[in-house]
Amino acid sequence: MFDYIKNKYNPSPWLFLKNDLKKDYIYIPYVEAPFLTLPATQDEFKALHKRKFWYNIKRSQKLFEKEHGDLNFDILKTEDQLDYYLNKVFILFNKRWSNEYTSAAWKSLQGFELYKKAMIDLASSNKSFLAVLTDKDGKLLSHGYCLIQDKTVSFYQHTTVVDDIYRKYSLGKILVYRLLSYSIDCNYKEFDFMTGQSPYKYEWTKNARMTYRQIGKKNIFNYFKSYFFKLRYFLQFNSYCRALLKPIMFFLEKIHGKFKVRN
């Protein structure tokens, strides 16, 4: 839960950053985690990209508002707000992944409930918040599930509506832009995009650090175990293997779901 972010809901992470590795344990590389050192001001932020980059974002928002009305960005921290919109997040996430395989716990309501509880609890002590992009009627279009730790905003989970009518508006990019701008205004020092090499992350930063999977203490059994995980992650993160395996895993997931219903 929460990858390498250590908190009361993830007291013993299985992922680590390089500076947190222990000498008497075995680790293997997992996947990169892009991050952005946040500029001190909005002007410095704007200087990171060319004018056309910002023009396209503003154009997308104006086009949306011309055709659909107001586009609203909000940071949610109160229990009532979070309780309402996290239910929408669960629906949006599952719609996004309805025709693709994902191992995420959010695929089931039982798995998602723990993350909902954690968000509401952590937000009460300013250790989390939910960033949302909504239309004039309050419909959830994009969200960012964010954790806060040591002046760092960690972008743990992000989903954007997949309906064809919204694709041309770059709503996910608008959310990230507004979220980064908010983080700068709040004097956060770093924005952690967390694990995964999704192309949208590298639109905002070129910096990334490797994460490491902890296997266990140094012994013969764990050395052999490390080779199993090396093979697993090669298959998981190699683009060709992933493209081949995802439809198979999605098919097996559907079969498993039908079997559970019958029994």
Image: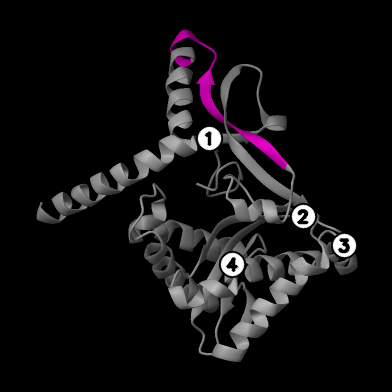
Q: Which residue is mark 2?
A: 151
CB atoms of marks 3 and 1 within 8 Å: no
Instruction: Give residue 109's position: percent from left, percent from top.
Output: 34, 61
Q: Amino acid at mark 4?
A: Gly
Label 1 residue SS: loop
Mark 2 and mark 3: Cα distance apart in space? 22 Å
Q: Amino acid at mark 3?
A: Ala
Camera-nearest residue between 195 and 51: 51
**What numbered label is drawn on residue 47?**
3
Between marks 4 and 2 in the image, the one whose residue lies nearer the viewer:
4
Residue 69 falls left or right of residue 251: right
The quarter holding residue 124 reads: bottom right
Can you see residue 69?
no
Task: Say what secondary structure mark 4 lies in.
Answer: helix
Residue topped by disc 1: 14
Q: Nearer the viewer, mark 3 or mark 1?
A: 3
Q: Earlier in the sequence, mark 2 or mark 1?
A: 1
Q: Is residue 217 magenta?
A: yes
**Element carrying mark 2:** loop
The residue at which mark 4 appears reads as 172
Q: Are marks 2 and 1 in contact (CB under 8 Å)?
A: no
| Residue at image point 54% right, 62% down | 119
Mark 3 lies on a secondary structure that is: loop
